[in-house]
Amino acid sequence: MFKRGQIVYFVLFAFVILIAAGLVFYIYGQNRNENLGGASLDRQPIELFIKSCIKRTGEEAIIFISEHGGYYTLPANHYNKFGFDVPYYFYHNVVLNPSKSEVEGQISKYIEDNLNSCLRDFQDLKKYGYNIEIGKIQAKSMIIPNSLILILGVPIKIQKGEILQISENMRVQLENINLDKIMNFNSLIMEIQVNRSSAICLSCIINHGVDFDLQILLAQLEDNILLFTIVDNTTIINQQPLIFNFVSQYGNYSCTNLPSDDLTYVQYCANERIRNLISNQ
């Protein structure tokens, strides 16, 4: 039989074991709650999520902007009939195709306006009690051969209790994106067209399309108005080739034979006249 002192000893020992077990389960439960649903504040998974959204939004920007001739916000002088909404690249002897820096700016603007559609204000983290603040997103795009580089300032504060994390300045490079090639082709065609304002050199377009490995489709929308569709089968997004659209209008007049109803062309000729006078002084 156990003596009274032994019974007290065993009771105290069991009590200590019970407290220790409870402490272990408490600590385990706290750690599990903090990591519930993959909502850990480790920097790497959060940044990977943001970069995946940058990539996705960047690809969406490329598709949208290419379909609209390099623009997110179309210029005032664009064609918007018969379901088409595309810019003029050649308008009565005036070359209007955007520069590379302009297209880069249009891509950046698209991403700034649409990135949060993918991030969804981090609702997946907020439902686990995290307080998240997203500052103003600033994007920079760089079109280089065979790639598009996106650099984004994404000021994000993520806090739960005493934990605070800030993520920003992320770089994503989209490979096998040939916007540079398409823009170089478009510029070359416009240079040729300047010298043939009243007609189109089909053989020139076809031959240069072969040289650039591009498929060129032409459709007449109205008298003297052609839709150019550039198909790049080497740039594949969402299992589809990249399509780039713009229109050109060919007039039967020049700066020595001004139209009576086209103020844009009249202003262009006036500017050219002033520029020539200044250069000859």
Image: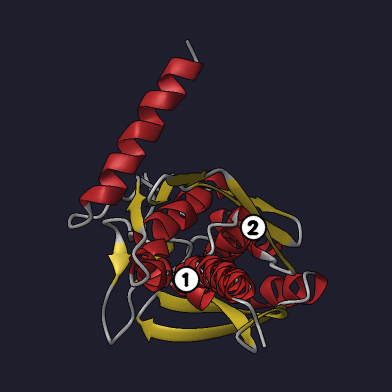
Q: Residue furthest left?
A: 261
Q: Is residue 119 left or right of residue 21?
A: left
Q: Residue furthest right?
A: 211
- Measuring from the top left, give residue 179's x and y in whole percent: 64, 63
Front-lying residue, 175 or 161: 161
Between circles 2 and 1, the one closer to the viewer is: 1
Q: Is residue 91 visible?
A: no
Give the quadrant of residue 206.
Answer: bottom right
Front-lying residue, 219 or 139: 139
- Measuring from the top left, give residue 152's x and y in whole percent: 52, 48
- Measuring from the top left, give residue 129's x and y in whole percent: 34, 64
In percent of the image, x 40 and y 50: which residue is there?
A: 159
Q: Is residue 52 above or below residue 166?
A: below
- Total count of labels: 2
Q: Is residue 195 above or below residue 56?
A: above
In percent of the image, x 49 and y 60: which residue is there?
A: 197
Helix, strand or loop for disc 1 = helix
Q: Quadrant of the N terminus?
A: bottom right
Q: Is residue 178 above or below residue 265?
A: below
In percent of the image, x 29 and y 58: which residue is there?
A: 77
Instruction: Give the labeled residue for mark 1.
Output: 33
- Dot 2 amino acid type: Gln
In percent of the image, x 27 and y 45: which residue is there?
A: 266
- Measuring from the top left, give residue 165's x and y in whole percent: 49, 46
Instruction: Give the labeled residue for mark 2.
Output: 44
